[in-house]
Image (cartoon, grey):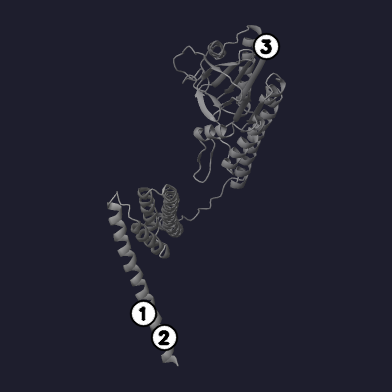
Amino acid sequence: MPYFRLIFSFGLILFYFSSEAQTTKSIDSLRSLTKEIASDSSSNDKNDLVIISQFLSEAKQIYSNEDIIFAYQQLAAVNYNLGNTNQALRYYKLYAVELEQLSKTENFKKQRFEKNLYENEIKALTSKIASLEQESNESLLLYNDLVKKNYWIYLGLRIILVIGALLLIGWLYYKYKKPREKPVVAKSPSNSPTLTEVLTATKDELTKAQTELNLADLLVQGIITHPNDSFAANKSLRKKFLIHQPKSMAGGDGLYIATEKYKTIIAIFDTPGYGAAGGLLSTRIYNILEELVQEHHIISPALILNQLEINLLNIFPAGVPFTGGINMALCLYNSTEKTITFSGANMDLFVVQKGYSHKQLGAAKSLIDGSDEIEYSNSELAVARGTNLYLSTEGYWLQKGGHDHKPLGKPAFEKTVASLSSQPIIEHEQVLNKIFNDWKGGNEQNDDVLVLGLGF
C-alpha cells in the first residue's frame, strides 16, 4: 500500500510538470503567431481573431498580465481592420483597463520594495545605534572603573608621601636634637618672681589688652554710622538687598545713600583695617559725603571723588597713617531718565542684563593711596527693565576657604550674580550669603564684607 501511494504521487508530479510544460509551449507558439499578426498592420483575416482569442485565453489561465494586455491590443486592432468598430472599442477599453491595472500593480510593487528597503535600512541603523550605545555604556563603565582605581592609587600615594614626610621629619629631629642640659638649680633671692608668676602676669596683661580692644569696639558701636541704618532709611529704591558682615564688632566698610527728588546718590567704600579704627574712619568718610551732597549739592560721582580726596588729605596734614588707600564706588541714579552715572576709585560696578554680566570699570587708583593724584571721570549707563546692579567690597571674593584654602575669586562672584538674573533681587542676598559662608567654612574671616544689590 505505501508503494502504491508513492507511485501515485510521483505520477501526479509528472503530470503537473508535463501539463505546465505543454501550457508554456502552447502559449509561446500563440504569442509568436500574435506577434506576426501584429507586424502586419493591414491584417483583416477572421482567423487572426481566433488565434488571438486563443492566446488571450491561455494568457488568462497563467495570469500573464503582459500577454493579456498585448492580446487585448491586437484584438482591438484586428476588429478595427475588419470593420467591427464596437468590438474594437470594447477590446480597446479592456486593453486600457488592464494597462492601468498593470501600472498600479507595478507602482505598488515599486513602493512596497522601497518601503521594505527603507524599513530594512532603519532596522540596520537601529541595530547599529543600539550596538554603539552598548559600546558607549561599556566604555563609560570602564572609564569610571579606571577613575576609581586611579583615585585610590592617588590617595594611597598621598598617604605614603605624608607618612614618609613625617618619618623624615622625626628622623631629622632626633638626629640633630641637642641633648637636654641638666637644669642648674640656683638659689634666688626670695623676692625674685618664679616662672609661674611671670606667665600668670603675662596672661593677665594679654587678657587686659584684648578686653580693652573689645571695649573700644563696643564704644565705637555707639558713635559710628552703620551701613544697615543707611540702607533701611532710604525708601526710594525698593528692589534692593544688603549684605554687611564686618570682621569684628565694628567694620571699615561703609554705605551712603541719599535721595533728592528723582536723583539718588549711592556710595560704598572700603577703608584699610577693621575694628574700632576702621569704623571711625568709615564714619568720617560718611560725614564728608553727607556734607558734600547735602550742603554743597555736589551730585556728580566724579566730582565727589575728587573733592573727597582733597578733604581726606586735609584731615591728615602730617601724612596718611595707613597704606593701601580707600576704595570707593559712586552711582547717581536718575529715575526720570532711567540712567546710572558711575565713577569708581579701584572699585567696579557689576551690571547684569538679560542673564549677561559686564563691568563698568572704575579708575585703577584708590583714594589717598600715596600715588599721583588723578581726575576721576564719569561713565553713564542706560537702565532697562530687568537690569540688576551690584557694588561690593573685595572682602567677599578675597575670603579664603574651600579644600585648597584659596580665595573665592571675583570671577565666581560675577558668574553667581549672572546666574541669579531670573530670580527676584530680594532672593539674591540669601544665595550670596550661603555661598560665602559655605566657602569660608571654619576658617577665620579675612576682611569686612559689604555687598549691595539693586534691581530695576
Q: Which residue is mark 3?
A: 260
In this rendering, position of residue 85 left or right of residue 254 = left
Residue 312, by quadrant, is: top right
Three-letter code, disc 1: Leu
x%, y% of residue 74? 36, 53
Give the crowd class for mark 1: few <14, some 14-19, many >=20 residues within 10 Å. few
Distance from label 1 to label 3 (Cα)?
Answer: 117 Å
- In this view, the residue farthest toward the bottom is 1
Q: Which mark is residue 8?
A: 2
Q: Which mark is residue 14?
A: 1
In this rendering, position of residue 123 left or right of residue 424 = left
| 283 vs 41, nearest the viewer | 41
x%, y% of residue 385? 61, 22
418, above or below 341, in the image: below
Which of marks 3 and 1 precedes in the sequence? 1
x%, y% of residue 365? 47, 20
299, above or below 432, in the image: above
Distance from label 2 to label 3 (Cα)?
Answer: 121 Å
| 36 vs 242, nearest the viewer | 36
Three-letter code, disc 3: Glu
